[in-house]
Image (tube, grey):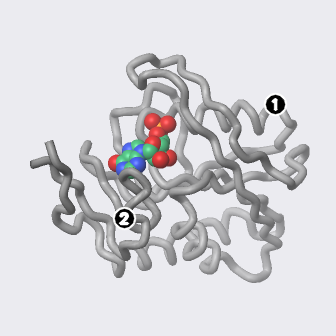
Amino acid sequence: MHRVLGSVLISSEQIQRRNAELGRQISADYAGGAVTIVAILKGSFLFLADMIRQISPEIPVEVDFMAVSSYGNGTTSTGTVRIEKDLEVTVAGRDIIVVEDIVDTGLTLYQVDRILAGRGARTIRVATLLEKPGNSKYERKIDYVGFQIPNAFVVGYGLDYAQRYRNLPDIRVLDEI
Ligand code: IMP
C-alpha cells in the first residue's frame, strides 16, 4: 500500500475566510477580557498563526505551546498522553482557548483539558481547524470549529503524514493506492 496526495478538500481561500469568521467570533466572546491560547504542536501552527491575527487588537492575547504524544493503540477509549513539551505561561485563573489542528477520537483534547483544569484554569474553550464528527469518544463541546470533514486522512496547512505535507497551503486528502 502506498499513499499519495489526493484532491483538495478545503482550499486556502476557504480556510482564510473561515479564520476571519472565527477571529471575529472569538473577539466578540472575549471582548473586555483577556485570553491565553494553548496551541497543541505541531499540527496547529499555521491555523494558530493565521487565526490569531484575526482577533481584535483590543484583546490581550497570550500564546504558548504544548506538545503531547499518544500512547496506546487507538482502539481503546482510555488512552493517555505524555507531555513532550510543557507550557511556560500560568494557567491558574486564566481563560484558555486550546487550539488544535484536528479533533478525531478526542483523546488528545480530553487529556489536555484534564491537565489544564488540574492547573486551575478559569475557563477552557477549544478551537479546532477540523473535526471528524462522530469519531470522538468523549463528550466535549468544541466551541470553535473551522470545518467538519468526512472520515478521511487529510494533510496540509500544518497537518502531516509522517512529518510531510505540513507546508501545503490547502487541506488535501491522502489517498491509498
Ligand atoms: P485525537 O487525539 O484522536 O483527537 O487525534 C488528534 C491528533 O491526531 C491530531 O492532533 C493530529 O495530529 C492527528 N490526526 C488525526 N486525524 C488526522 C488526519 O486526518 N491527518 C493528520 N493528522 C491527524
In screen coordinates, is 58 left or right of 20?
right
Cβ of disc 2 within 8 Å of ligand 1? no
In screen coordinates, is 116 left or right of 154?
right
- Checking the image for residue 45, the label placed there is none
Tell me where residue 165 sits by quadrant: bottom left
Identify whether 56 is placed above or below 79: below
Q: Compare marks 2 and 1 and give the one earlier in the sequence.
A: 1
Between 55 and 166, the residue placed more toward the observer is 166
Query: Picture coordinates of residue 136 (x, y %)?
Result: 42, 32
Q: Which residue is mark 1?
A: 118
Between 72 and 132, the residue placed more toward the observer is 72
Secondary structure category for the residue under label 1: helix
What is the distance, in whole Å, between disc 2 and disc 1 at their CAs?
Answer: 35 Å
Image region (quadrant) for ligand 1: top left
Secondary structure category for the residue under label 2: loop
The residue type indicated by label 1 comes to: Gly
Query: Picture coordinates of residue 64 (x, y %)?
Result: 76, 59
Query: Picture coordinates of residue 16 (x, y %)?
Result: 43, 78
Q: Is residue 144 visible?
A: no
Q: Which residue is mark 2?
A: 165
- The quarter of the rendered structure image containing the N terminus is top left
Furthest residue in direction left, as rendered: 177
Q: Is residue 3 visible?
A: yes
The residue type indicated by label 2 comes to: Tyr
Point 62% across, 30% down: residue: 81
Point 67% across, 71% down: residue: 27
Identify whether 133 is placed above or below 70: below
Query: Picture coordinates of residue 38 (x, y %)?
Result: 71, 54
Identify whether 113 is placed above or below 161: above
Cβ of disc 1 within 8 Å of ligand 1? no
Point 44% across, 17% down: residue: 76
